[in-house]
Amino acid sequence: MTFPVLSIIVFTPIVAGMILLLVPGQRKDLVRWIALAASVLALGLSLWVYLTYDRSVSGYQFIEKHAWIPTLGISYAVGVDGMNAPLVLLTGIVMFTGVLVSWGIDDRPREFFAFLFILATGVFGVFVGLDLFHLLFFYEIAVFPMYLLISIWGWPVTREYAAMKLTLYLFIGSVVALVGILAMYYASGLRTFDMQALEQAAFSPAFQRTWFPLVFFGFAVLGGIFPFHNWSPDGHVAAPTAVSMFHAGVLMKLGAYAALRAGIMLLPEGARFWSPLILGLATVNVVYGAFIAMVQTDFKYVIGFSSVSHMGLVMLGFGTLNRQGLTGAGLQMFSHGVMTALFFAVVGMVYDRAHTREISKLGGFSKAMPLVAIAFIVGGLVSMGMPGFSGFVAEFPIFLGLWRVQPIVAIVAALGIVITAAYIMRVIGRVFYGPMPAEFEGHIPPITRRDQVALVVLAGILILVGIQPGVMAPLIQSGADSILRLLGGA
Amino acid sequence: MTLPPYTPAMLGAILPELLLLILAGLVLVVDLTGRGRRSLGWFTAAGLAAILVATLYFGRPSADQGMVFGGMLRHDWPAFAFTVLFLFSAAITCLLSLDVPRVGTRGEYYTLLLVATLGMCLMAAASDLIMLYLAVETTSIPLYVLAGFLQQDEKSAESGMKYFLFGALTSAVMLYGFSLLYGVSGETNLYALVNTIRLGQVSPLFLGGVAVLILTGFGFKIAAVPFHFWTPDVYEGAPTPITAFISTASKAAGFAILVRFVLAFLPDVSTYWTGVLAAIATATMSLGNLLALAQTNIKRLLAYSSIAHAGYALIGLVVLTEFGAASLVFYLAAYVVTNLAAFTVVILFARSAGSERIADYAGLSRRSPGLALVMMVAMLSLAGMPPLAGFVAKVYVFAAAVEGGLVWLAIVGVLNSIVGLYYYLTVLKVVYLYRSEDEGKAIAVPRTYSLALLVCVAAIFVLGVASAPWLGWALRTAQSLFG
């Protein structure tokens, strides 16, 4: 038996969470160090998986499979391929940096980290799952802790509303997907939830067209697809920093990935039939999200809507159903995850010091916090798709793929990039440059060493992938190729 | 009619019932001696646990799962599985009763509880109309008394009275249905009369009418719409451990007879049953969930939620398939352990804080983090979140609906579970989010209650994560019902 590294990654956070609950609540520093240790372990193992994944042989590796509920053909099955290995790494990165920037949480940190880690286990579980039941099981584990994390530690003004809205939206999505999954289970006649077996099930085209929307859009709710994106900016804004990072950085990828894995890969004919709709809605995401981000006065809402816009690019990549588009979507999931985690970390650091997020009341922060400003600018350049940063590596293939299927969509969506540049420039100019309001002068303490580490790690990864796409692109391409085989080698 | 010859299998078949009767007698004797009244609850709970173990080891149905006592009882998997569920629920209820004032130290309280449990075990095994009716009454009458056990408390008296009136009426209607069945068939044995009716070409209209009469009685027991009106008032007024018992064991007992009855009539009636039961399931789920939204009292909220859960469980019956029946049994098991955990928290909170209002649960997460955590586990399991029992149970039930071709019913269930999630979350919101002035006051958790909580929470996780063996039991139960 091989070393069950994926299982260890999946269960490290939840075990750490349980240990945390046993620690006396007053020993807050002990709690934080345990959390950090667990996140370092998870990050280290996911990096190890990423680096030792054998790229010369594509397909699933590190596979573990155990019967779970054999009467129904349900198994605990995990494995990584080119598509999800980067996402596992992404989760490790966000978990690690999320713990670093949450050091200052003083209200019940024990429960905070415990819930955050339950969520992390759910996320890891979905990304590595090879069984539909397994996937859904962990999917819901990832969704629920959000409610508590936002409603207890969130921004007092909107947290109750935002938390409830988010949870209900996501739950609706997942139960709708559940019905679709059950339909697949029975229609296949295979009596198994094993996705690799179901890929070969050859569902009739009519069946695929009927059920694809339920599965795809059910999961895509969490990917923030228009018109089901409404929960996401509210949720982002109300959440505490680390949770926003997790939420925008990882959870939205969770929805997109599940939609890809259970929707497109299992019902390829349905995907082909519905792809015009996906392209259309995703274009709305990109352009409309960017416009709305443009007019926001709250710093965090700008980033929240930018996530809607950027997740639209992921969905566009899915909608192309070709090699470039899918590869770009995979890269964009990783790149946007790191970028948005960086953005929210920065927003959190600014807010903790200024106690406001009104863009008009901020200014000149580059002098007080130069590193934060640099990090934000790196993130901004990524989101504009500047060459040399990971955003370019991701967005370029998406547009390439789009051009091949729908040039008009490519042109319209490119508008979104222009607007993105505009709102990012506006935020950089207003918040980090210009005169600093008098009340902040001399009252802005420097960020801590831990915050610095988090920012440097996140920004460094964005630049690394940007100047050296070879560390990731071929891997994702191999993942995209196996999806294309299911789509009939288009 | 001659008496059937005695065989040892007959004793094995009624082993739990015999032991329950002995235990009830012992409790009365111990109570009379007047020593150690506080330990009565412990004694009863330990006795029930011992009976549970004995049943698990010696009470298993034999391979033929045949009738015993001249066709009065059927010693089969459904009887066995439900008996285990009842004994579990009764044992936990005893633990919960111990520290409830004016309840936990009374010998007759425990005796009544044991007799009601005895009745339930007979309900699960009864295969004869007369036995069935007697079993229902043996269960119901002690429960009426228990619901009104706090004579000085107006609400409890009201609860007992309401329960009694509704129960008496519905059981009379049910009895009328039984008498008509006897009239057309000349048989009282369920399986024999089904055969006679099948051969005799009875008019479907007549059978439909009889079914409505009988469903009234069963519907009351499981609190299905439109026979649910007693539920909130009875649940609110009864001593909370009894509420827990009625909402779990008694409901499961209702399902035990309902499932046996409906499935015995297969395949003749499938066309009616599907329509009628689907309508009842939809109404029960939807109404229970919608009315739960407006509740401010935790016991009433759980009452409406328990109505809704009867609706989800009914989905498993509507499809009339083997997997459907199995999913129903599993659903009940998951629901029983979860609801018991929820009620334990309610009892403990009422004991320390003296309130059952949801708003007063504010600050519970600071007053007692452990209790808040249990509340969260229970609420989330009821809402159907993994890795808890409620999630797999819901997946099974919805899977049964899809398998049976009733996708629309699965969608109704799915939509309902969203409504359910909303009100369970509002409870958690109060528990975790809101502050209160009483935050400094800790909530005492006696050892008995910790034990009950531990057992229930462990069961919730075990059913949720390692459901395979329990699903296997449920499937065997279903096979036996179809066999």
Image (spheres, coloured by chain):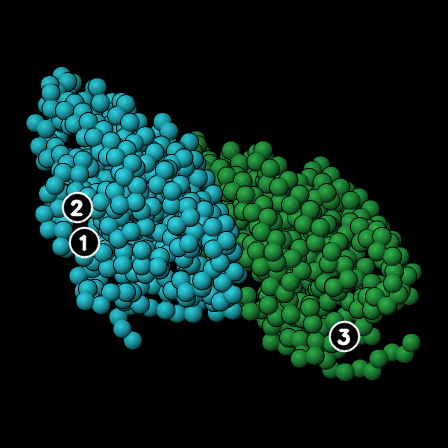
Residue at the disc numbered 3: B67
Colour assigned to chain A in the rendering is cyan
Residue drawn at point x = 77 percent, y = 70 percent: B73
- Observer able to see residue B182: no
Q: Which chain carries label 2?
A: A
Residue at the disc numbered 1: A473
Residue drawn at point x = 51 percent, y = 47 percent: B383
N-term-proximal mark, 1 vs 2? 2
- Identity of the amino acid at label 2? Val
Residue at the disc numbered 2: A393
Could you say where residue A37 lies in the image, as x and y percent from the top left? 21, 54
Colour assigned to chain B in the rendering is green
Q: Residues within 10 Å of mark 1 (few under 14, many from 20)?
A: many
Q: Which chain carries label 1?
A: A
| Front in this rendered view, residue A304 or A415 | A415
Q: In this view, does B170 lie to the left or right of B412?
A: right
Could you say where residue B239 lies in the image, as x and y percent from the top left? 65, 45
Q: In the rendered structure, are the residues bearing label 1 and label 2 in contact, judged by CB atoms less than 8 Å apart?
A: yes
